Image (cartoon, helix red, strand yellow):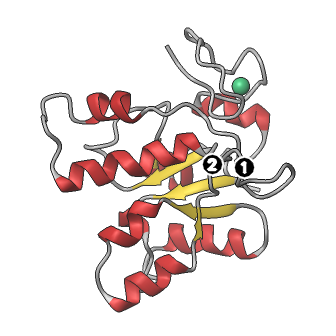
Amino acid sequence: MLACVRCGNADIKDAPRCPDCGCPLTLSAWKDFGPPRGLTLDTGCVNARDGDSHLSQLELWAAEGKLTLQRANAMLSELSGDKRVAKARLLAPHPRVFTWNESVWGGPDVLAGPDLEDEIGMLLFPTSKPLTSNQWHDVQHLRQHVRTGGEVFVTRNRTTHPAPRYSTAYTSAIGGTDRSINT
Ligand SMILES: [Zn+2]
């Protein structure tokens, strides 16, 4: 069962797109849909020394207004080193989830997607109970990404983020054969 991060449809069996809003759910479906706009960077993708050409390309596209690079709240609590923290602060935080009596219609807060904390924890770390601090942070990145309607999760970690529906592998989305992110 899949859940659409765009419209909240939580009853999608196995389809390349959300049947309600058309949001692509597979890498190949993105090719017909157009480039993604909202990208969440994992903590390992803070390009502090500008040494990663793929991340630098994403930063260039962000500066050109072609996409938005975002971070979960968990990123700043995980990072150390002045340079890395300063670079991370340049990323836009995920938008706040719309809260009754606090948020305003038409404001920046977003209507929440599904809260998949338990599901993501089980998917990433099925044998860990309880989660370690690092594992908990890994879950929070993806949880907030889904909850706030992020479109692509950028990570270099191939072993702890195996779910293709919620993580777009770093190389396949940016430097590999899938060119759907190119604008
Ligand atoms: Zn949808």
Ligand 1's image quarter is: top right
Provide the secondary structure element on which disc 1 rests.
Answer: loop
Q: Residue furthest front?
A: 101
Q: Residue at x 67, y 50 (%)?
A: 181
| Amino acid, disc 2 | Val
The secondary element bearing badge 2 is classed as loop
Vertically, is 76 above or below 82? above
From the top left corner, tell me how far across and down residue 2 is, in percent: 53, 19
Query: Residue 8 shows which numbered tag?
Result: none
So how many labels did they put on this image? Answer: 2
Which residue, given by chain and number where applicable, does mark 2 sit on? 97
**Which residue is at 34% across, 45% downward?**
139
Residue 101, disc: 1
Q: Eyeballing the image, is 9 above or below 167?
A: above
Label 2 crowd bin: few (<14), some (14–19), many (20+), radius 10 Å? some
Residue 41 vertical placement versus 61 (above, below): above
Rendered position, 160 above or below 116: below
Please, what is the three-letter code of the amino acid marked with disc 1?
Answer: Asn
Question: Residue 78 lies in what quarter of the image?
Answer: bottom left
Which residue occupies 36% across, 27% down? 119
- Percent x, y of residue 159: 25, 43
* Image spot of residue 79 (x, y percent): 32, 74
Q: Residue furthest right?
A: 106
Most foreground residue, 3 or 29: 3
Residue 124 shown left or right of residue 55 in the figure: left
Mark 1 nearby-residue class (10 Å; few <14, some 14–19, many ≥20)? few
Of the pair 144 and 159, the residue shown nearer to us: 144
Label 1 near label 2: C-beta < 8 Å? no
User: Which numbered disc, 2 or 1, marks the residue closer to the eye?
Assistant: 1
Query: At x 61% / y 64%, what residue is drawn?
Result: 69
Whole-Å distance between the Cαs marked 2 and 1?
12 Å
